[in-house]
């Protein structure tokens, strides 16, 4: 069981969430109660909600919140039929749309379309905040800790800094999704979350720093975004990733960073090296899913990591395949007969083409020598 906190305009929502299994890697089931608290006037609205939204929150959540807010301005009674329809709606496949029928007094019946993105790894991501607070080396260490599903706490004064940085850190895991407790801004009543024995990625306001430091915690990475320092760490963060690939990420991040102007350029520049890291380490996964007569896939784990020629890469992947990040990804791949046509698959195909071209050039050089 995990938790998600989502902020939207003058609403703040907290809910419990449980990551779904096969076929729903990027989504969570929000079960129980969304607490929508109006900042102005402290008006509380309790909305029972069991629906499907993206794990890191953002596209489908924002559309749904828009609809909830619009109905709340009319009457609380108008919200519940909408939420009921959302609960009963079929879960859309990536890129597909679900249409809800909803009645609003004085407006009549309307149809609302909610689309599950085909691939939205940079949607609502702002890496500039993370770059402003931390060095490339520190970002890589945070990424390494997240890849092994460790406990990570971010400290900052501002709510926006916390929210943007934790969302950016989670986005670095693409095409994998953080499947554990995820709270961008932990309310005071939930500070005990930092004592949980299970993995989490949370943000805490700086005014609670001492309470966090005094809490019994084991193997946690505590990041001070204001000072750009690690207050606590396990100690092996620099050694988690294969050295050569870690250097490749750092070199790619360093190149041309000062020339970037738009947020889109920054996001693509920062995300790219981490996507390429996964392409090199696990991009061959589809070749090691064998299908039975019924079309059900079965992942050949041992053959998969033994296919890597680099010992350091193999050592890392042997650990990574045991994480829930990878397990949920493979479960979806086993169920789907064809790899998803997203950004990650595009980069895998590009990488395979580059390797083929390199082999062709090397063969041509050898032939000329002969």
Image: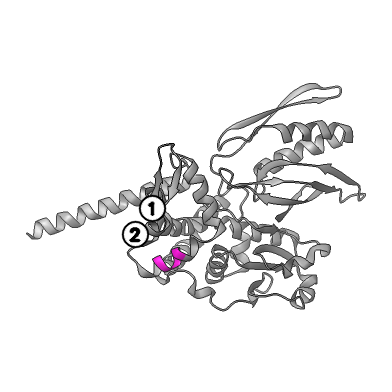
Prevalent SS, magenta region: helix
**What residue lies at 65% left-to-right and 72% top-to-bottom?**
220
Q: Is residue 261 visible?
A: no
- Count of marks, rendered view: 2
Reply above or below: 28 against 157: above
Residue designated by label 1: 284
Residue designated by label 2: 307
- Within 10 Å of the Cα at label 2, are there few (<14), some (14-19), or many (20+) other Cα atoms? few
- The CA span between labels 1 and 2 is 9 Å
- When asked about the image quadrant of residue 228, the answer is bottom right
The spot of residue 318 in percent (x, y) is: 45, 64
**What residue lies at 55% left-to-right and 49% top-to-bottom?**
121
Q: Is residue 133 visible?
A: yes
Front residue of 292/37: it is 292
**What residue lies at 49% left-to-right and 62% top-to-bottom?**
320
For the residues bearing labels 1 and 2, Cβ distance under 8 angstroms: yes
Q: In the visual, does 276 lie left or right of 117? A: left
The spot of residue 189 in percent (x, y) is: 84, 63
Residue 69 is inside the magenta segment: no
Reply above or below: 139 against 346: below
SS at circle 1: loop
Mark 1 and mark 2 lie on one chain; the one further toward the N terminus is 1
The spot of residue 50 in percent (x, y) is: 74, 41
Front residue of 258/210: it is 210
Residue range of the region highlighted in magenta in the rendering: 314-318
**What residue lies at 86% left-to-right and 22% top-to-bottom?**
106
SS at circle 2: loop
Residue 316 is inside the magenta segment: yes
């Amino acid at each position: 069981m995990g938790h998600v906190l989502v902020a939207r305009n003058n609403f703040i929502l907290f809910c419990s969430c449980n990551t779904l299994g096969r076929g729903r890697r990027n989504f969570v089931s929000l079960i129980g109660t969304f607490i929508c608290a109006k900042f102005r006037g402290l008006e509380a609205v309790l909305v029972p909600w069991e629906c499907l939204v993206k794990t890191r929150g953002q596209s489908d959540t924002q559309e749904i919140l828009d609809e909830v807010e619009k109905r709340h301005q009319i009457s609380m009674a108008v919200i519940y039929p909408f939420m009921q329809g959302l609960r009963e709606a079929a879960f859309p496949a990536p890129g597909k749309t679900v249409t809800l029928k909803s009645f609003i007094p004085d407006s009549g019946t309307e149809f609302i379309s909610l689309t599950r993105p085909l691939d939205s790894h940079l949607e609502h991501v702002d890496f500039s905040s993370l770059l402003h607070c931390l060095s490339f080396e520190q970002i890589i260490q945070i990424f390494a800790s997240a890849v092994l599903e460790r406990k990570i706490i971010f400290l900052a004064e501002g709510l926006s800094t916390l929210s943007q940085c934790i969302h950016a850190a989670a986005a670095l895991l693409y095409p994998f999704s953080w499947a554990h407790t995820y709270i961008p801004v932990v309310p005071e009543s939930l500070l005990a979350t930092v004592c949980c024995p299970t993995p989490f990625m949370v943000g805490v306001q700086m005014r609670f720093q001492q309470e966090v430091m005094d809490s019994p915690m084991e193997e946690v990475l505590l990041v001070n975004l204001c000072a750009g320092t690690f207050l606590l760490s396990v100690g092996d963060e620099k050694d988690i990733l294969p050295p050569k690939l870690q250097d490749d990420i750092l070199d790619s991040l360093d190149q041309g960073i000062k020339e970037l102007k738009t947020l889109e350029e920054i996001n693509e520049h920062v995300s790219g090296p981490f996507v390429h890291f996964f392409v090199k380490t696990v991009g061959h996964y589809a070749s090691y899913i064998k299908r039975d007569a019924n079309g059900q896939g079965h992942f050949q784990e041992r053959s998969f990591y033994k296919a890597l020629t680099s010992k350091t890469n193999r050592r890392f992947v042997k650990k990574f395949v045991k994480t829930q990040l990878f397990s949920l990804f493979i479960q979806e791949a086993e169920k789907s007969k064809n790899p998803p046509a997203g950004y990650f698959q595009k980069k895998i195909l590009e990488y395979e083409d580059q390797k083929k071209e390199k082999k062709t050039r090397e063969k041509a050089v050898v032939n000329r020598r002969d």
